[in-house]
Amino acid sequence: MKFVCISASNVSKIDHEGASAKAGRTIGELIRKQKIDASFELISLIDRRLHPCMMCAECFRTNRCAHDPAFNELFDRMMEADGLFIVVPHYALIPAKLTIVLEKVQEFAFLHGYNKLPGDFALAGKAVGLVVHGGMVESDEVCKYYQRALLEPVSHALKGIGMKVVSLDKGMPEGVVFGIKRMIEPQGRCLPELEHDWAEITGRLSLLTSKMLKAIGSKRN
């Protein structure tokens, strides 16, 4: 099995050490602990020069963007994966580069369906596990806000192209949500340090990973 995790963080100064990347690495560690024949790749969108979709429709029939080789390489990785994870931080709603990705896959899927091309769209039926988080101190109210403002829109966009969003339970029906434990404000720095409860977060990610493996197993059977 092959798993790909996309980190949608835009914070260039801390991206590879930030909460999105750490959540992705934690998912990879949880998969490796399953002792199954599986590979895992963590992809950071901050490393890719993505270009907004212009709705030019030149991707018709090809599933390739004529103007964006960075997206094409990412899309190849998404198609190859048996299971996809996406970690989404909260800034001004959906991060810009993830919005570009969602716009383009939506356009690919629309053109495929509208023109009645044979077979299913390339990402249809693929399992995807969602993780969203932000910089507010975690509470029930904060988690509900992240769910409404971030988790549900991303989930709906992916379901709209036929992807299977992994459900956890009634409390987290669309994926994992978490906030911070506290904010630390070091002197002389323009960005705060965010402290997280990684033991608690890892427990939630473990449930998501288990649900993902179950979803892929049931599909294969």
Image (cartoon, grey):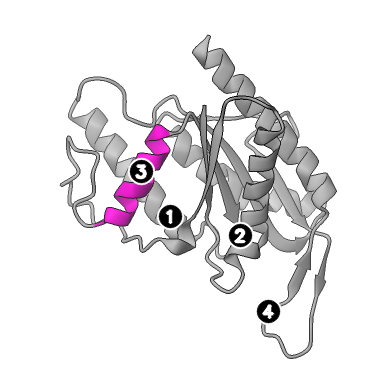
The residue that disc 1 covers is: 99
**Residue 101 picture location, percent across and down:** 39, 50
- Is 175 rendered above or below residue 66? above
The front one of 85 and 26 is 26
Q: Earlier in the sequence, mark 2 or mark 1?
A: 2
Query: Of circles 4 and 3, which is in front?
Result: 3
Label 3, label 1: how far apart the Cα atoms are: 14 Å
Q: Earlier in the sequence, mark 1 or mark 4?
A: 1
Label 2, label 1: how far apart the Cα atoms are: 12 Å
Instruction: Give the extent of the magenta segment.
Output: 68-80
Dot 2 lies on which element?
loop
The residue that disc 2 covers is: 90
In magenta segment, residue 78? yes
Label 4, label 3: how far apart the Cα atoms are: 32 Å
Q: Are marks 2 and 3 in contact (CB under 8 Å)?
A: no
Three-letter residue code for mark 4 = Leu
